[in-house]
Image (cartoon, rainbow, N blue to C red):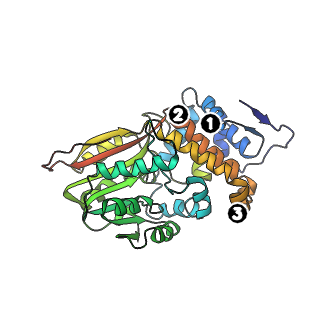
Amino acid sequence: MKLECCVSRSLPFYPTDQLQMKSEFDSLLLTILLAQEGWWDADNLAEVIRAGMVGPASWMEALADKWLMAWNKQTILQSLVVARLHYSLGPELWESMLGPSMNYTSGYFKDDTRTLEEAQINKMDLIARKLQLKPGMKVLDIGCGWGAAAKYMATNYKVSVVGYNICKEQLEYARKLCAGLDVSFVCDDYRNAKGTFDAIYSIEMYEHIGHTNGRSYFQMVDRCLTENGVALVQTGVMADNEIRSCMWSDKYIFPGGEFPYAYEMLTNSKDYGFVTEDLHSLGKSYGKTLTHWYNNFNANWKDKLEPKFGHLVDGKFQRMWNFYLAGGIAHYEMRLCQCLQITYTRLSRKEEYVSVR
């Protein structure tokens, strides 16, 4: 592994805030902050981050995690912050990084899957089959992103899809993508979803909900799902007892993001009378997906992305996003995170549910 350092630079100045204070006790965070300033670089950032993540969390990390988890960072108003700061960066970034599928979620890499596009189609089709979609059904897409999954469901399974999203830029893109299909979009918070649907799904939107709002999500599913309907959540989860907050990401990349623990996906749903029919780990798929995004981002940086994003954050944008993506790769390769698909039906459902792979 090649590691390049620049030790001639003057020490960077950081304002006195929580992130600065935590970096004084957290060597990995300090390492990331120094790399963000350009002090060092490596040809395999994920490997460097993995090396720094070995061993239990420090007392400062645990304390910071408890502090961050004490607040509801995903109220209806605060949820708009991540929509504005993260998802509104413009289609150039997302098209260059995600590829033609425009899926900002893990694909599903089977043994014979060779490309990211194939993996994303595998994922969308797997969700459709788990939801047991049939022509004419009404389907609710919570989060909906740039509309790729809604388009796939409507085109290939002849269903009617309603998508909820609070990011106006994503909705504008999604409406153009799904023009002419039986797909509509609502600019509103998931907690305000209305109507009755045969199937409900969210694909990695649950990380925007936060542990204090888990019950509100399943309250919405309870309100909107038909008696015999099927609901599915695809989400990243943290290994039990792992730190699930990241002050660096919370400040620079993903405000308010929070991975649930797997057990929360079972307990929160049970409170509203749902049965967990299937819990499916996508294995190494997310690490592979993130690696494709990392490679796409850097392959397109010079010609497509640098002219628009190179000046952002005092010229640190590329380094910050490289650490964001490489950190994700490290977490999934170390199995500190997993990507799960969890399927639910009502306790009162009479028909047997049989899952698929």
Q: Is residue 2 left or right of residue 54?
A: right
**x then y, percent, for residue 320:** 67, 49
Q: Residues within 10 Å of mark 1 (few under 14, many from 20)?
A: many
Residue at the outermost left position: 350
Which structural element holds mark 1?
helix
Amino acid carrying label 2: it is Glu
What label does residue 333 carry, if any? 2
- Identity of the residue drawn at 14% across and 48% down: 351
Amino acid carrying label 3: it is Lys
**Residue in front for this viewpoint, 311 or 219:** 311
Q: CA distance from mark 1 to mark 2?
A: 9 Å
Q: Is residue 50 left or right of residue 317?
A: left
Q: Residues within 10 Å of mark 2 (few under 14, many from 20)?
A: many
What label does residue 308 carry, if any? 3
Q: Quadrant of the C terminus?
A: top left
Regarding residue 216, the answer to whether it shows in the image is: no
Comes first in the chain, label 2 or label 3: 3
Residue at the outermost bottom position: 180
Amino acid carrying label 1: it is Ala
**x then y, percent, for residue 75:** 44, 60
Q: CA distance from mark 2 to mark 3?
A: 32 Å
Contact check, label 1 and label 2, Cβ < 8 Å: yes
Quadrant assignment, res 229:
bottom left
Contact check, label 2 and label 3, Cβ < 8 Å: no
Residue at the outermost right position: 8
Q: Quadrant of the N terminus?
A: top right
**x then y, percent, for residue 321:** 64, 49
- Identity of the residue drawn at 43% across and 68% down: 178
What label does residue 46 carry, if any? 1
Tell me: residue 125, above or below residue 63.
Answer: below
**x then y, percent, for residue 143:** 42, 60
